[in-house]
Image (cartoon, rainbow, N blue to C red):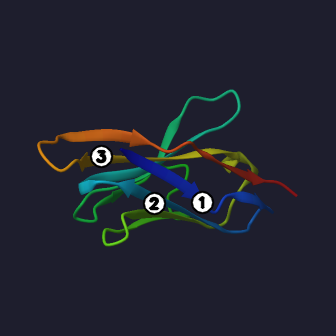
Amino acid sequence: QVHLMESGGGLVQPGGSLGLSCAASGSIVSINAMAWYRQAPGKQRELVGSITSSGLTEYPDSVKGRFTISRDDAKGTVYLQMNSLKPEDTAVYYCNADICAGNGYCTYTNYWGRGIQVTVSS
């Protein structure tokens, strides 16, 4: 029905930048909040950025000033621009979104992408 697909991950040196994209596909009626999470080895999954349908954003202290989340509703895509990357940013990054889908009755359902690896290492 609905799928989220992340792209743009990879290996980057400390201090470098990466941009992640997540595109939603399927019979989408509307998308409410969208977010990025990450899970590092041995750590719990944590929120790294969220954005409401009106564009209100939130970030944890660990990434404030370095990460920027944005969205393009026409494309059904959410982005995460990551600057000044640190080794501690190494994790699998997951896209998340509340989506109403279907041709008839539907309610908002939370969806997750498969995750994409981001490695920050020299």
Q: Residue at x 13, y 46 (%)?
A: 104
Q: Decide: marks 3, 2 in contact (CB < 8 A)?
A: no
Indicate which disc residue 61 carries.
none
Q: Residue 78 in the image: x percent, y percent?
A: 42, 62
Quick check: marks 1 and 2 in contact, CB under 8 Å?
yes
At x 41%, y 67%, the residue is: 70
Which circle's residue, 1 or 3, is located before the other in the chain? 1
Q: Closer to the camera: disc 3 or disc 2?
A: 2
Q: Residues within 10 Å of mark 1 (few under 14, many from 20)?
A: some
**Residue pointed to by mark 1:** 7
| CA neighbours of label 3 inside 10 A, class few (<14), some (14 to 19), many (20+) | some
The disc labelled 2 sits on which kind of residue? Ala
For residue 78, side relative to residue 117 (left or right)? left
Q: Secondary structure at mark 3?
A: strand
Tell me: residue 121, above or below residue 16.
Answer: above
- Earlier sequence position, callout 1 versus callout 2: 1
Q: CA distance from mark 3 to mark 2?
A: 13 Å
Image quadrant assignment for residue 10:
bottom right
- Kind of residue indicated by mark 3: Asp
Q: Is residue 119 left or right of residue 105?
A: right
Disc 3 designates what residue?
Answer: 98
Q: Amino acid at mark 1?
A: Ser
Q: Residue furthest front?
A: 103
Per the rendering, the mark at residue 23 is: 2
Which secondary structure lies at badge 2?
strand
Tally the numbered discs.
Answer: 3
